[in-house]
Amino acid sequence: MNNEILRIAIQKSGRLTEKSMQLLSDCGIQLQNGKRKLLSPATNFPLEIYFLRDDDIPQYVEDGVADVGILGENVLLEEQAQVNTVLELGFAQCRLSLAIPKNEIYTGVDYWEGKKIATTYSNILKKYLAEKNIKADIHAISGSVEIAPSIGLAEGVCDLVSTGSTLLSNGLKEVEVILKSQAVLVANQQLSPQKQQILAQLLFRIRAKQAAANNKYILLNAPNDKIDEICALLPGMKSPSILPLRNSNWSSLHSVVQEQAFWDIIDKLKAAGAEGILVIPIEKMIV
Ligand code: PRP
Ligand code: ZN
C-alpha cells in the first residue's frame, strides 16, 4: 500500500504558472482548492501542489520541503541547487542574453571588458564572463533590470528575453545569447521508493501528453492502386490501417504522423492521389 503523497512546487505567479497548472490538468489531475492557496491537494492523484516563488523552488526541492518542482532552467542554473532534472517540458522557452542601448555599436564579446552590467543572474553571468576571459563589473539587482542603462546604473544588462518586447520598449538591443532555457521538472535526489513510484506515474502521464501534442491522427482516401506509394510517404507508428470503402476502388488510410512531418508530406500525398485528408488532434498517446 502506498500512502505517500508527492509534493510538487510550481511558480506562484509568473510566466510558468498557467502552463504548469495546465500541464497538471492535462494529466487528469484535479485540485481541491479552486483558488490558489499556498497549498492545494489533488483530489484524484497522490499529489500536493505548493505555490512558491520560482527562485525559491530549487532550494525547496534540494532540501526536500518539496519532492519535485517545475521551474525554468535559467533559475535552476542560477541557483546552483543539487537536484535531478527529470524531464524537459518544452514550454516557457526563453534565452538569457546580454543587451545594450540600441544606438551603441557592438564590437563583439570584448565590448564587455570593464563595463558595468546589471542582472539578476550574477552566477550565470560570472561564469560566462570567466569563460570568455572578460573582466566586467557585475551589478546584481533584484528586478527591473531593463531600466538600469537609462538611469545610468549600468552600461548593459543580462536578462531573460522571451518575445523581446521588454528590451524593445526600453531602447535596448540583444547582442549575445548566454543560454537558452525552458521549463523543466526537477526532483529531490533522495526520493523514497514510494515517491519515485508516484513520480513515475506522473511522468507517464506527462509523456503521453507530450507525445500526443507532437503527433496528429491522419485519415485520407486513396485509390487502391496508389496505396503502396501513399503508405511509403506516411511514417506512421507501425504501419497505416487500411479500411475498405463502399466504392471498391478506394480505401481509407489511417495513421499517426508528426505535426512537422505532416506539413512536409502534404503536397506529396495530394500528388500521389490522396483525397479527403483529415488531420485530427490526439488527446493522449501511449508510446
Ligand atoms: C523576464 C525578464 C523580462 C521579461 C522578458 O521576466 O526579466 O522582464 O521576462 O520578456 P519579453 O522578452 O517577452 O518582454 P520574468 O517574467 O521571467 O520575471 P522574473 O524574472 O521576475 O521571474
Ligand atoms: Zn523569478
Image: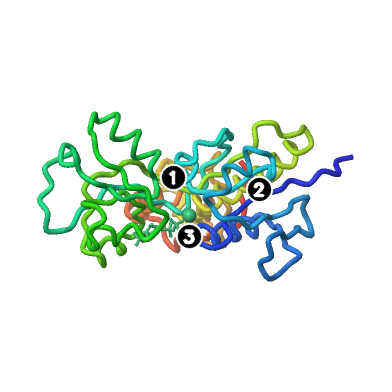
Q: Earlier in the sequence, mark 2 or mark 1?
A: 1
Tell which tag, 2 or 3, sits nearer the viewer: 3
Residue that badge 3 annotates: 15
Q: Amino acid at mark 2?
A: Arg
The quarter of the rendered structure image containing the C terminus is top right
Question: Would you say residue 249 is visible in this rendering?
Answer: no
For the residues labelled 2 and 3, say whether their Cβ atoms are less than 8 Å apart. no
Please state the horizontal and vertical placement of residue 109, each as a whole percent of the image. Answer: 18, 38
Q: Earlier in the sequence, mark 2 or mark 3?
A: 3
Specify whether tag 3 is near ligand 1 (CB below 8 Å). yes
Specify whether tag 1 is near ligand 1 (CB below 8 Å). no
The quarter of the rendered structure image containing the N terminus is top right
Q: Secondary structure at mark 2?
A: helix
> Relative to 100, is 178 on the left or the right?
right
Q: Secondary structure at mark 1?
A: helix
Quadrant of res 197 = top right
**Residue at x 45%, y 41% (from the top left corner):** 78
Please state the horizontal and vertical placement of residue 221, each as a whole percent of the image. Answer: 47, 58
For the residues labelled 2 and 1, say whether their Cβ atoms are less than 8 Å apart. no
- In the rendered image, the vertical position of residue 193 relative to residue 23, given as above or below: above
Disc number for residue 74: 1
Q: Residues within 10 Å of mark 2 (few under 14, many from 20)?
A: many
Q: Amino acid at mark 3?
A: Arg
Pick the front one: 184 or 280: 184
Please state the horizontal and vertical placement of residue 132, each as a whole percent of the image. Answer: 25, 31
Q: Amino acid at mark 1?
A: Asn
Please state the horizontal and vertical placement of residue 271, each as a whole percent of the image. Answer: 32, 54
Residue that badge 2 annotates: 205
